[in-house]
Image (cartoon, rainbow, N blue to C red):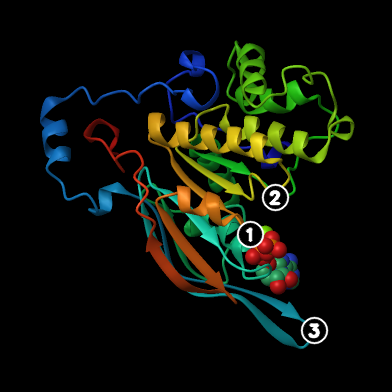
Amino acid sequence: MVGTVLDSTGTPARPEAFDSGASLRFPQPPKASAPTATAIHARLPLFSPIFRMLTATDLTKEYQSGESRLAVLKHVTFSIPQGEFVAIVGPSGSGKTTLLGLLAGLDTPSGGAVTLDGVDITRLSEDDRAKLRGEKVGFIFQSFQLIPTLTALENVQVPLELRGDTDAAERARDLLNRVGLGDRTGHFPTQLSGGEQQRVAIARAFVNQPRILFADEPTGNLDGATGERIVALLEALNRSSGSTVVLVTHDTALAERTSRVIRLKDGDIVEDRATGTVHAAPATAGDAR
Ligand SMILES: Nc1ncnc2c1ncn2[C@@H]1O[C@H](COP(=O)(O)OP(=O)(O)OP(=O)(O)O)[C@@H](O)[C@H]1O
Ligand SMILES: [Mg+2]
């Protein structure tokens, strides 16, 4: 479904500088050209609102269940600075996927607000939210959401085609190589294993180097070695492009590799802690918006 495919035209850098495997690097974001602005940014406190990539304020989500209302998220509030690498963890049914959908503007809350890169997305029309997602957000769905009538290569190309890139096929092929699917580019989703479909979905979410990437259980269907390759890709995107990464995982080892763990239980945040793992500086002067 084209409407769920997300791209990122906000990042002008191109992925041709990729290395292979875990040492993969993304091009550096462009530096600010005005020295005065750079100097001002550099002197801002790190957690100044200008560096907040994502803020959830008093976020609630309820569903009608027969006669009663089911509260799936209960007044969730937190803030994520630009460039942070965050894991959302918690038991099945605790609201992780629901929260990710709200944060990415794929769904609307029952109450509260989400601010993404300075824009209150809960006040936008559906069309404007879609546009913003297209410019800034990558999303790896728990259920992959590949387009069944397109091949693996075409699925990855879609976000690039939507913004009119002429080298879409070449870049999509490069990404598929990097997730280990260079020999499956012509396969349709039904001809791919679950883990292979997941990797196509990951390549698609990466292809535009989104400013913020949401990933719902990105290693859930992968063996250890393949999962490691995907985690290395996520880390590279975060480290080299300064992209903010928010992932949902049941994998405690993966959660500890991020810099911050937010734990949900029954729709509430019950823990929010730094892991001690150091990642890319949350923001650079030239990257602030
Ligand atoms: N459309 C819906 N209508 C009613 N209830 C829903 C709907 N979507 C989700 N829920 C309920 O909201 C709760 C949270 O679902 P969610 O998918 O966010 O959980 P999760 O933490 O991602 O779980 P998992 O780890 O199993 O993926 C669940 O109890 C689910 O049944
Ligand atoms: Mg889920």
The quadrant of the picture occupied by the N terminus is: top right
142 to 132, vertically: above or below: below
For label 3, the residue is 66
Q: Between disc 1 and disc 3, whose residue precedes?
A: 3
Q: Quadrant of residue 148?
A: top right
Q: Within 10 angstroms of label 2, few (less than 14), some, or many (20 or more) residues?
A: some
Residue type marked 3: Gly
The label on residue 142 is: 2
Residue 189 spot, x, y in % from top left: 83, 33
Residue 140, given in percent of the width and then of the height, sits at: 63, 43
Marks 1 and 2 sit apart, C-alpha to C-alpha, by: 8 Å
Q: Depth-wise, is mark 2 or mark 3 nearer the camera?
A: 2
Instruction: Specify whether 250 is left or right of 268.
Output: right
Q: Name the disc covering residue 97, or none.
A: 1
Q: Position of residue 254 (x, y in %)?
A: 54, 49
Instruction: Report the Cα–Cα distance between label 1 and label 3.
Output: 22 Å
Amino acid tagged 1: Thr
The amino acid at mark 2 is: Gln
Rate crowding at label 3 as few (under 14), some (14 to 19) or many (20 or more) other CA atoms within 10 Å: few
* Secondary structure under the numbered disc 2 in the rendered image: loop
The residue at the far bottom in this view is 67
Q: Earlier in the sequence, mark 1 or mark 2?
A: 1
Left or right relative to 278: residue 58: right
Label 1 residue near ligand 2, CB within 8 Å: yes
The Cα atoms of the two marked residues, 2 and 3, are separated by 27 Å
In the displayed structure, would residue 272 be above or below residue 142? below
Does the residue tagged 2 have its C-beta within 8 Å of any atom of ligand 2?
yes
Ligand 2 location (quadrant): bottom right
Mark sitting on residue 131: none
| Rendered image quadrant of residue 280 | top left
Give whichever of 95, 199 is nearer the camera.
Answer: 199
